[in-house]
Amino acid sequence: MLTINRPVDQKPEDVLHTIVKRIGDANRVKLKMVKRYHRYFFKVLNDDEKKKWMKSNCGVIDDIKTDQDALDFAIKLRAIQTKHDGDMPIHVYYAPYLNENEAAFIIMGPHIIQDGIT
């Protein structure tokens, strides 16, 4: 989880899209799992899959208002199993109203992808 000063001049959806755009396509976030030879590998998403990923694995969560709410949400995300062919294991959510002055990005996924170690 990453907290930031809440932007007051942008809509929450625009902030989320800006961050996802800045992550870029070269980053290892926009991946899916592919099973080959009884092992899982990561494959970069094509354009249609990226649109599906944005709809299914990204979003603005308005009802996270405290650190505990954010932790509970992250724990629920962590419980999602992604061990099937075609699964997209990275989730990016934006909580614009974490508290009075802050917003948060909650990014969840396998640590092997986020660290860049394969």
Image (spheres, rainbow, N blue to C red):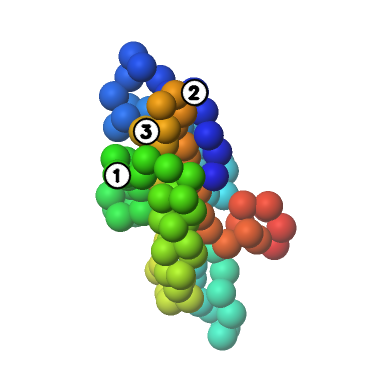
* Quadrant occupied by the N terminus: top right
Tell me the SS state at disc 1. Answer: loop
Q: Is residue 17 in view from this perspective?
A: no
Q: Nearer the viewer, residue 9 or 52?
A: 9
* Quadrant occupied by the C terminus: bottom right
Residue at image point 44% right, 24% down: 101
Q: Is residue 40 in view from this perspective?
A: yes
| Kind of residue at disc 3 | Pro
Q: Assess whether mark 2 and mark 3 are in contact (beta carbons under 8 angstroms).
A: no
Tell me the SS state at disc 3. Answer: loop
Q: CA distance from mark 2 to mark 1?
A: 18 Å
Q: Which residue is mark 2?
A: 5
Q: Which residue is mark 1?
A: 63
Within the image, what quadrant is residue 100 found in?
A: top left
Q: N-terminal of the two: label 2 or label 1?
A: 2
Q: Nearer the viewer, residue 104 or 98?
A: 98
Measured as percent of width and height from the top left, residue 85 is found at 43, 74
Classify mark 3: residues with Cα within 10 Å, few (<14), some (14-19) or many (20+): many
Judge left or right: residue 30 versus residue 41. Answer: left
Measured as percent of width and height from the top left, residue 33 is found at 49, 67
Q: Specify the label residue 21 is tagged with.
A: none
Tell me the SS state at disc 2. Answer: strand
| Kind of residue at disc 2 | Asn
Q: Nearer the viewer, residue 103 or 86?
A: 103
Judge left or right: residue 109 versus residue 62. Answer: right
Q: Residue furthest bottom?
A: 38
Q: Which residue is mark 3?
A: 96
Measured as percent of width and height from the top left, residue 48 is found at 30, 50
Q: N-terminal of the two: label 3 or label 2?
A: 2
| Kind of residue at disc 1 | Asp
